[in-house]
Image (cartoon, grey):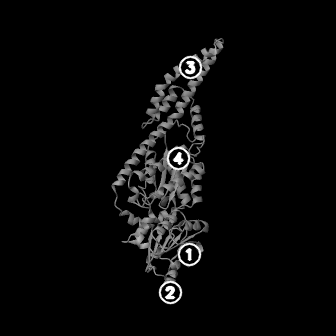
Amino acid sequence: DAGMSLLVVGLSHRSAPVSVLERASLAADQQTKLVQDSLAAEPATEATVLATCNRIELYADVDKFHAGVAELSTLLAQHTGVGLDELTPYLYVHYEDRAVHHLFSVACGLDSMVVGEGQILGQIKDALALGQELHTAGRLLNDLFQQALRVGKRAHSETGIDKAGQSLVTFGLEQLAGDMPVAGWAAGRRALVIGAGSMSSLAATTLARAGVAELVIANRTLDRARRLAESLTGLVAGARAVPMERVSAELPHADVVVSCTGATGLVLTADMLTEALDRRAEHRAGGAAGPGAAETVALLDLAMPRDIDAAAHRLAGLRLVDIESLAEAAADEPMAADVDQVRAIVSAEVAAFGAAQRAAHITPTVVALRTMAADVVAGEIARLEGRLPDLDERQRAEITQTVRRVVDKLLHAPTVRVKQLASTPGGAGYADALRELFDLDPQAVAAVSRADANGTRPDGGVGRPGAAAVQTDPKRGRA
C-alpha cells in the first residue's frame, strides 16, 4: 500500500561467499558517498546503509519498486567495485513488510553468523546516525531504525538468544581454545590486539578478563589504543599501546594475536609471520621465552577484508581462525528454542510497525479535513457578525461554541473510524476516499505532511522536505 515503500537490497554471509563479501566491504567515506548517491538517484526519497563485517545493505524509501531495485543494485556494484553481473546472483531484495521483517531479524541477531550476537545493535545505531547526519533519513527510516533497536533490545531482555550466540570475538577465541575454557587457555599468555575499533576493544577486554599476562594494543591512531589500554590496566598489569609500525617487533613475543582493522590490504603477511616464528624460536632456545609462552601461536582474524594472510593456515607453529573458518563452525551451532521465541517477537513487532505506519499515513488527511472544517466555522461566524453586529461577547462565544460542536460531532465518527480502518492492511485507500469525498486539496494535505516531516523531531531526526508527502498513486504492486 502507499503507506510504506521500504526497499532493502544487500548481500551478507548468508547470500555470498567470504571472497565476494571481502571485496564488497566499504570504508566509511565510501558508505557516505553510496548513501548520497542513492538519494540523488530518482526513485529514492530516503536512504542509509548498514555495513558490518558480514553484510552490506542499502535501505531506501522508493516510489517505484523495479526502478528502485535496478538503481540500488547498480549503485552497490559501482561503489563496491564488484561488477554488477558478478554481484547480482548474491544480492537479496526485500520490500515493504518483508524489508521491515528482515531488519528486525537482523537487529535480534537472527541473521548473524553467530546467532544472537549483540554487536549488531551498535552497527544499526551507526546506520541510523549516518542517515541523520547526512539528512538522508526521513520519517520512515528514523521510525524504522529506532524501532529495530527497541526490538533487538526486547529480544535480548525477554529471551536467552544472546546466550545462544555470543559475539564473534568470544566465538573465535572459543574456537582457538579448543576443548579448554577461554579463561584457562588464555591465562598467563601474552596477547597482541591489532586495531582499536569495537571488535578489537571487545577482544582486548575479553582477553584481559581471561587473565592474560601481557596485553599490547597496536593501532593507526595511537590515542585510541592508549585509551583502550588505560581502560584495561585494572585487569592486566602489563597493558600498553604501540603504533602500527611496531607490530613486527611485538609479534615474536605474542602467544595470541587478534586482528580487526578497517585496512583494505593485509596487516600481517606470511613473511612477517615466518620471521616472527624464527625470532620466537631463537628466544625459546635462549630461554628468553618467559614461563607462560605457548607452543603454538594462536591467531584470530576478525576483519573483512582479511587482515592476516590466509597462507598462515599452512605455517607450522601457528593456528589461524578467520571469518571463513568461523562461518563453518557457526553453521554447526545448535539452534535453540530461544530462536522461535525471538521469531515470534519479530513477527508481532513487524505487524505493529506496519499498522503504525499506515495510521501515520492517514493523519495528514485527517488534519487537512479538520483544518477545512475550522475554516468553514470561522467563515460562517464572520458572516454572522456581519449580519448581526449587535451580538454581545457572551452570545457570540456561545454561538461559536455551538457551531464548533456541531462540526466536531459530525466529524468525530468518520475520523475515528478512518484511523482504525487505515491501520489495517490495504487501508491506504481510505485516505484517498476521504480526500475524494470532502474534496480536500491535495496540496493542503501534502503541506501538512511536509510541516510534519520538517519539524525538528523529538528524537533529533530531521525529515526531508516532501519525503512524506501523501502519495496519491493507486495501490502499488508487491514484489
- The answer to whether 151 appears left or right of 399 in the picture is left
Q: Residues within 10 Å of mark 2 (few under 14, many from 20)?
A: some
Q: Residue 430's spot in the image, x, y percent?
A: 47, 32
Foreground residue among 359 and 233: 233
> Residue flagged by tag 3: what amino acid is it?
Gln
SS class of the residue under badge 1?
Answer: helix
CA–CA distance in space, label 4 to label 3 = 41 Å
Classify residue 477 by image quadrant: top left
Residue at (42% x, 45% y) in the render: 349
Q: Residue 455's spot in the image, x, y percent?
A: 60, 40
SS class of the residue under badge 3?
Answer: helix
> Residue flagged by tag 4: what amino acid is it?
Leu
Query: Label 4 belongs to which residue?
Result: 141
Query: Label 1 belongs to which residue?
Result: 247
Query: Label 2 belongs to which residue?
Result: 282
CA–CA distance in space, label 4 to label 2 = 58 Å
Residue at the bottom extreme, as displayed = 286
Of pointers 1 and 4, the one earlier in the residue sequence = 4
> Residue flagged by tag 1: what amino acid is it?
Val
Of pointers 1 and 3, the one earlier in the residue sequence = 1
Mark 1 against mark 4, which lies toward the viewer?
1
> Residue flagged by tag 2: what amino acid is it?
Glu
The answer to whether 171 is drawn above or below residue 426 in the figure is below
Query: Label 3 belongs to which residue?
Result: 401
CA–CA distance in space, label 2 to label 3 = 96 Å
